[in-house]
Image (cartoon, rainbow, N blue to C red):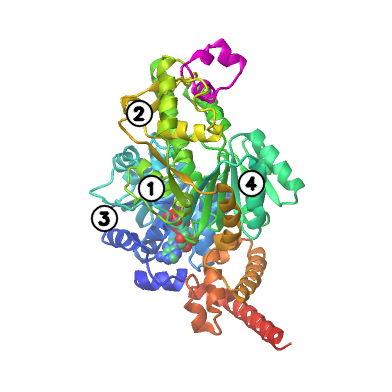
Amino acid sequence: MNQYEILKKYFGYDSFREAQETLIGSILSGRDTVGIMPTGAGKSLCFQIPALMMDGITLVISPLISLMKDQVGSLNQAGIHAAYLNSSLTMNQYYKALEFARQGRYPIIYVAPERLLTEEFLDFALHTKIAMVAVDEAHCVSQWGQDFRPSYLKIVEFIGRLPKRPVVSAFTATATKEVRDDILDILQLREPMVMTTGFDRSNLYFGVMAPKDRYGAIRNYLECHSEDSGIIYCLTRKVVEEVCERLRQDGFGVVRYHAGLSDQERKKSQDDFIYDRSSIMVATNAFGMGIDKSNVRFVLHYGMPKNMESYYQEAGRAGRDGEPAECILYYAGQDVITNQFFIDHNQDNQELDELTRALVQERDRERLRKMTFYCFTNECLRDYILRYFGEYGSNYCGNCQNCLTQFETVDVTEIARGIVGCVQSCCQRYGVNVILDTVHGANTAKIRQYQMDRNPHYGELSKVPMYRLRQVMNYLQLKEFLAVTNDEYAIVKLTANSRQVLENTEQITMRMAKEQENREKGEKKARKGQASGVVLTEQEERLFQRLRALRTEIAREEKVPPYIVFSDKTLIAMSKAAPQDKSQMLSVSGVGEFKYDKYGERFLASIQMESGQSARGQQG
Ligand code: ADP
Ligand code: MG
């Protein structure tokens, strides 16, 4: 079989995605190959398909037991024999798996890196034909990455011990140059073909909100998306507890996850979420690594993460199946302070000398600042993200809150001049709040103590509402007309550009959302149901629900997560097409022959039942 036939027969897909074809071609030509593609781009197929075509076994190195389990589960569901070798197996199971491997039963074997140099494993590997070593999550070799794993360094030694060097391929979603160079060097790849695809995830909708009642906003969101599965990330364990408790009281089926819980509860929460027994996960950033659940329809952030890297990684857990999904950040000013605190009290850097530690802190503060700007910007959010990662987006994506918001251009020159003037006249000594209180004319003890009530700009902007002053203050920082120092005092300073404001040489305009409140209400209605993808007619929606119930039933029987039986995307396609026979069913994207043989009939029967019922409904 060639790669196209395998894609159709086992995975049920009609065509390869961008890059997959090139990567597979390169591996099949015997060349070392590196694929750097965002989450959900479909990296697994790039090594799984060649593995089925090459003469010999493919070893896949993967850092986490949960990832191995998930992928091996998917392969077996698709009718491909695969196994994993890691510490979750008992001694007996392990030897049994090795024995089957020796007999050549598995074209693909997932191995934990710690196993590679053990005696039993080497004994197997040295006497077997290994066609390829595929390193998944390859950024784990790099100390620059967030998930460095020393055991990944063993991979090269292992490859060196093999009688014949196999093709080596490596895959990751981490794009930075340092990490990429480390992958090439440390894995000692030979003239590799390196393919990097864009980091855009066009199916993800991005939004930022700053609601007064954060909890209420999240609850509203959940009410409007009660059919969907999603994650709510919180900044601290305490907030996880609070949000989880309130949601339970409000009748939502949620589970929680953070580093303070027992291993047992964490595992149970994770399983409940993955197996769709609980549709909402409330967690700290401790949750998510190694979660391949493809039908996460939304990732909400109850609080701003510490940098864009974290945000994009966490948000990116939505919509892995390529169906529309939403990533919304609920921001509050307090988040900056919480994150500052984390940076100032970071325990990870204990071993660094003072100078290096200061540099790391400085860098972290800078990253936090960029994260904060993401919350303020009125430009395309996707463009902001892509530019942060060194790519050029277009300044209109049409699928983020800012692109979909009606903006009006407001002249804020006067306000800007008042604020910048105040910063100048107080000799750049105070923080944001003092400056804004001064121009607003607040009569507080602090203002009197600092004698800011005698500042020439005192009360100058008393008619402008405080929220507008804040918006302009944020905007002035974003555009570098002002800067705020990166230390705990956060003093507002002038910049080289400040003069343009003071001397009135520049008109300052800002894009502001029109009628914010009405829009939010309308949006809530408009978006309901849309998160789960293509808009379904009422009839298709009924069928979808029925097929989903069948999927849950089958998943229980097979003891696998529902999305491994069929993805949401496949079920939606099936509901739209409503296939009536085998050949129609096989033309649905995601339905391969093996899966058809296993449950195709049951899905066909379910479709027939639904159409029978709706026909009767129409008659009566
Ligand atoms: P990654 O490892 O890059 O994050 P995965 O390999 O887990 O991504 O794939 C993400 C999803 O995309 C899976 O549900 C997979 O079945 C699906 N997928 C992969 N390739 C294709 C394709 N050519 N057509 C349709 N869906 C695909
Ligand atoms: Mg992957």
Q: Quadrant of the N terminus?
A: bottom left
Is residue 102 visible to the viewer in this orientation of the structure?
no
Label of residue 92 in the image: none
Locate residue 579, reporting x and y percent. 54, 81
Mark with earlier residue (4, 1): 4
Q: How far apart are the alpha carbons under marks 1 and 3?
A: 35 Å
Mark with earlier residue (3, 2): 3
Look at 72% across and 51% down and name the residue there.
252
Label of residue 501 in the image: 2
Label of residue 217 in the image: 4
For mark 3, give the secondary structure: loop
Between marks 2 and 4 in the image, the one whose residue lies nearer the viewer: 2
Q: Are marks 1 and 3 in contact (CB under 8 Å)?
A: no
The magenta span reads 430-456
Q: How far apart are the alpha carbons under marks 1 and 2?
A: 27 Å
Mark with earlier residue (1, 3): 3
Identify the amino acid type marked 2. Val
Whether label 2 lies within 8 Å of ligand 1 gets the answer: no
Label of residue 31 in the image: 3
Identify the amino acid type marked 3. Arg
Residue beneath disc 1: 383
